[in-house]
Image: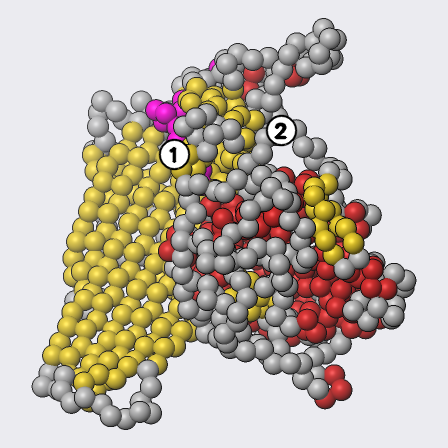
Amino acid sequence: MAAPFNSGKLPEPLRKPSGSIDEMAAALAKQVSARDEQSVPALLTAILTAGFGLRDRDGSVLQTVQPGQGLAFNAWEVAAMAKMYGESRSVQLTYLTDGLKSIPELKQTPLDTVLLDGIRKHAQGDQPLLRFWARFIVELGRQQDKPYDILGAVDPKSVRLDAIQSALILRRLIGDFYGFAERGKQASIDFSVDDLLGVGARPAWIDGKQQTPLFIRASWSGYDSPQFVKVRVPKSVIRTSQGSPCGSLGTGDAATILDAAATVITSGWGGLLGLGQPGGGAEKYGKFLNIANIILAYAEFIATYAALETEITVENSPLVRTKNSRPGERRQLTATVKMNTGGWDNINCLRTALNVATGLDFSLIKDGSLEGVEVNWNLNEGGAGDSYSNRTGATSKHQIVGFAGNNSPRIQSAGTNAGIAGRGGTPVGNLTRTKTNSEGKAQIYLEGSPKIPYVVEPAATVMKQAIVSTTIKMKGGDIKGDAVDVMGQAMGGVSGLVTMPLELLYRTDWASSGYLVVPVEDHESCTGQWRGTITYTSKYKYAGSGEGANNKSYWNEEVDYTATIELSDKRDEYGKPLAFVKAQASEIRERGGQGITGCYRINNQLQKVSGTAEDTASVTVSVRPDGRYGLSYSLPLVLASGTYTVTGRRGGTCRNPFDRPVNQNDPIKDHKISPGFAIDEGGMIDPKRPNVLAGSKTVTKEWQRDGQATVTVSWNLVSCGRR
């Protein structure tokens, strides 16, 4: 999903799927979560269906819903959120809202519950745009690796927002505050909470009047960089020239607002924010305009972190775990942090705009390695909550590794005054918080956890894995987790001065990047049963072409299916070894044709789907008296999703002006992909290694409509109890 960010160009959106609002939201969220070549087009469709505009580099706006929510995303923001989503970056809801509460007017607001309550309300509401917006956010949560349901009784502290959810929530929040400010233009009128709730529930067609229609791909003369209302520019800041990619920064209305009236009518949270109380007039509502711009700056600042890239490597894998109470082997992990601004100049425009707005030195992003960046290390799989626990043994039966330093003491063992200067305690540090050197590299050790209790021989070797990720902070230091009111330079507003909270800009810990799977060689007590892996791969291809007197055609079909079976020491109800299988499959079917002479059509049909499946399977290992063995197992169907695209255009010498080109995309879901044909796996047991069954076999043959299929099966099983 990083291609649009790197290329500087968004693809065309998909056609809206059929069905109700809720069904469309579910289908598009599933397509986005596939993280394939159709995911970004599906994201664009979702953004447009929710009533947001898409503003391109030239200022033109793509808007499919009239009148919409009155809000827009810049193309670079969408490319950024797509890249960050594809890299599985996310933020805890409470972390995001704690940062927003550094804005004084929001300090006492329970934002985490308010935001969830508003999403729940609109997910069941009658306003089509807001219902889709809320449902799409809900469905993205259901598609996460650790799914959750906002419509259920979910604890706000357990909710993690991906980059798309975060952007959609912040954009609607910007619209709400801008809507409050618009109502405040009537300086002599005060509005109550009830008034705001009434506006929030008001349909767009009330009183038989439509809002001002928005344009489709209409020209707009504004700037593509973030805009701030009446910014006071410090003398030390030099504005960019009008001819630069950034244009004039710090002046004019935010390009995010397309239709001020629509931002009021489609209020996302209304009176739930508790800010619409009577009194204050234009001065009070002028502050809302500044809050909207502060949140806009924060949202777009987050988007610039799409340019942050981290690559993690491990030396000399796999890591071998011990069989006793001593720690196992160590492997050094290296995270290399660099910047890649891709094809969007707007990334640097945003940083420049923040310089103008705050008077701070947010240096322009430069491609290449970054020095002095804080890198926090996390174990997503294979570790325990206490990263220091590796010194005294595993605190969880699932822990196989832990982070380790250069013999630095554990904080748990350093005394009650640990780390406190002048109190006699042992100096300690945060083991998992490191910084990059001049080459942009940060390092830490991964160590095999002790086995408590130890493994009794004979022991079986079992391959496992640990998953390591990093969390990045561009500005190091100890900024507290609870938001503090640290203020920057003043931003001018209708009512005077509203400050920009620096805490908000420094809360970038959520921009997590870097992910690595580390193979770990573990040992477990022997049960005498076969255990290990079986890998099945099938590839099918059917392609050809033909030509007649007046036309020619072609066809191409490709089906790939891969499954990995992990055979454990457990048995099913019939006594057969129980295995866990993970499968993934993809299918491409393309057909096309065209005429040869005169006026003719050039047509193409393309179906692309992919999917995954997880299941349990019974595996049978049979050993004959003569030493010959065989394997049998079952493989699951894969339910795939994707798109069906039909294109057509005229060719040759045509004069019909009404013969227009065709470009149609339709979503596909629950398409079944089966494994290829079965082959006979097995062989003779090696007398020197009677406890090991290992081998590989490949068969190629004509299959289904004269196509060619190749199936490869490899297996590696051990049974430590056999002699």
Residue 414's x, y, as percent? Answer: 66, 11
Residue at image x 42%, y 62%?
10
Total tally of numbered discs in the picture = 2
Q: Residue furthest right?
A: 279
How crowded pointer 2 is (Cα within 10 Å; few <14, some 14-19, many 20+) is rated as few
> Which of the numbered marks, if any, corresponds to residue 494?
none
How crowded pointer 1 is (Cα within 10 Å; few <14, some 14-19, many 20+) is rated as many
Does 640 sit left or right of 266 as displayed?
left
Above-or-below relation of 664 to 279: below
Above-or-below relation of 158 to 444: below
Residue 651's x, y, as percent? Answer: 22, 83
Residue at image x 21%, y 71%?
555
Residue at image x 84%, y 68%?
187
Q: Nearer the viewer, residue 429 or 721?
A: 429
Q: Amino acid at mark 1?
A: Arg
Magenta range is 309-324
- Mark 2 lies on a secondary structure that is loop
Q: Can residue 87 be spotted in the picture? A: yes
> Which of the numbered marks, if any, corresponds to residue 477?
2
Does 444 sit left or right of 136 as displayed?
left
Q: Quadrant of the N terminus?
A: bottom left
Above-or-below relation of 115 to 404: below
Asked which quadrant contains residue 604, the reply is: bottom left
Which residue does the numbered mark 1 point to in the structure image? 531
Residue at image x 56%, y 26%?
433
First along the sequence among labels 1 and 2: 2
Residue 427's x, y, as percent? Answer: 64, 12
Q: Are marks 1 and 2 in contact (CB under 8 Å)?
A: no
Q: Residue furthest front?
A: 235
Q: Quadrant of the C terminus?
A: top left
